[in-house]
Image (cartoon, coloured by chain):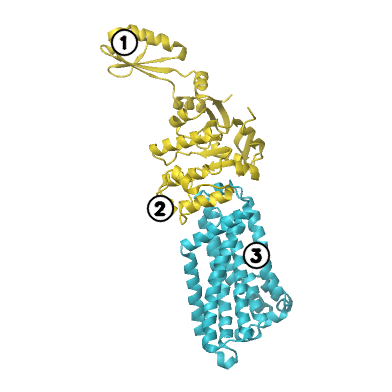
Chain colours: A cyan, B yellow
Amino acid sequence: MTRFLAIASTELAILRRNRWLVMVTLIMVLFALALTFAGSAPTGTLGVDMLTVSVASMTTLSVYLAPLLALMISFDAIAGEAERGSLGLLLSYPAGRGEILMGKFAAHLSALGFAMAIGFGSAGAVAAWFGGAGAESLVALGRLIGTSMLLGAAFLVLGYLLSALAKSVTAAAGMAAGLWLVFVVLYDLGLLGAVVFDAGGTFTQKVFPWVMVANPADAFRLWNIAASESVALTSGMTGAAQALPAWAAPLSLMIWPVIGFAAARFVFRRVEP
Amino acid sequence: MTEPTLTIEKASKDRGKLRVLSDVDLTVAAGERVALLGHNGAGKSTLIKTVLGLTPLSGGAIRVGGAQPGSAAARRATAFLPESVSFHPALTGREQLTLFARLDGAAADVAGLLDRVGLSEAMDRRIGTYSKGMRQRLGLAQVLLGRPVVALLDEPTSGLDPVSRQDLYAIIDELAAQGTAVLIASHALTEVEARTDRIAILRQGIKVADDTLANLSQAAGLPIRLRVRASGDADALAQQTGGRRINGASVEILCSPAQKMDALRRIAAMGDAVADVDMTPPRLEDLYRHYAKETVQ
């Protein structure tokens, strides 16, 4: 336990020291505020409060930003140590590899969670102050922060997996960029193409929603939309969410960090420094 | 005497078709300092990695203080200094060493250790501002954590200035004095010579020598070099002694350790014809070259 805490507190110190935490929190606040003000126009026409609209816009933001920030932190985790020559030394200490990975994960996730809570929270507070907020929109804000952390967690562990697979930091960075592009951009484009090609056939009806929810980024989107009617209303994306049982998106989003961590640990075990 | 602290028996390691280590036997007792010499790629670092449990053996066995390499007990018992190590540049020396102390699980006087390796001024500065020698000292400080049973030092002097090297060997002596078995992989032959109890030489994954310096030089039969400076005619002196003139005034004589006193007596008997005599016993360099180049039968 002390070893896990030692790793985690050291990793947090590094994130604070190299300004990573400050920069990411700042990015989150700025983006969230910008979206909240830019997206405040449709409030009247849809008959929902400003916080609801703000959460809907921030959900779209988080789909892109949470995986990106998570990968930016995690791609260096193992490859960086290996390149500095400190991995062998670290592994010669009694801490197990799973323990090392868990310590880094705890630190990285809490840093990510801090940035998201501050960023989304401050934008939410501004929206509530200017445009009002109900109990439902506050729950939606809390859900947004929670699911964003889960999405971040999924991409953190995928970053460790790449970092353990890569032979160098540069390769790990390149693989992380590719992974982001595939999960966040190309996956949806591919699905869109398939749906257009299928023209409302069996694929679109039966298979498509499941394929979509298998991607953590889409599961995140679906969860936030399906859980709140007014968020769904403002985002205009209800079709896929209704085709699936309510547990599908939460299950996908919760299982990704677990599977990813197990895979990263498995590959890390085989790394010879 | 109990069993040796570090025992390596018939250790073999294959990387693909290449045999990196081949039936290497090596023991280091508590308080003993053993130098592990060899060219680049001779298998020194691989041997150290197998002792650390970082890479599995293809054959043979290793015991670290009675434990399997890589086991929790073995890792607690071992200290390791990697070759030209570096740490996260954003941390301070004190933070980095505190992390290692907490991973080690033993209470440690972090500031005291940093002071011991000469980093007391720099301990609260970022490692990014350290010189290579300072990073090496920080690496050495973590070796001293928690009274290791076995210490493995991979090229510990690389990047150190001569004064720091003296400090390093003083610290190694301290380690040995407190009962740590020390294995030093090195290229810096001249220092290892005076500072180790035993020398093992690896050549292409095979141990070609393992003994004290004196025994090794005797077994190698390397000549002692006598350099005689003539006060007058160097050619005449060369003829008289059976040596070889190497410059205007000096003659070099090669003789075996057994003939050494004989040769010295003859030179002394020549009286005024000889101005000066220098005697060079075979150095580790000669020895190393002898054992590292010798074809293995």
Q: Nearer the viewer, mark 1 or mark 2?
A: 2
Badge 1 and badge 2 both on one subunit = yes
Q: Quadrant of the N terminus of chain B?
A: top right
Mark 1 or mark 2, earlier in chain: 2
Where in the figure is residue A270, as x and y percent of width and height? 63, 50
* Chain letter of disc 3 in the image: A
Q: Secondary structure at mark 2?
A: helix
Q: Is residue A165 above or below residue A234?
A: above
Residue B49: in sight, yes or no? no
Give neighbour class at mark 2: few <14, some 14-19, many 20+ (Cα, 10 Å): few
Give neighbour class at mark 3: few <14, some 14-19, many 20+ (Cα, 10 Å): many
Q: Which residue is mark 1?
A: B237
Which labelled disc corresponds to residue A257? 3
Q: CA distance from mark 1 to mark 2?
A: 60 Å
Give neighbour class at mark 1: few <14, some 14-19, many 20+ (Cα, 10 Å): many
Q: Nearer the viewer, mark 2 or mark 3?
A: 2
Where in the figure is residue A205, as x and y percent of width and height? 73, 79
Amino acid type at mark 3: Pro
Q: Which residue is mark 2?
A: B129
Q: Secondary structure at mark 1?
A: helix
Residue A58: in sight, yes or no? yes
Q: CA distance from mark 2 to mark 3?
A: 37 Å
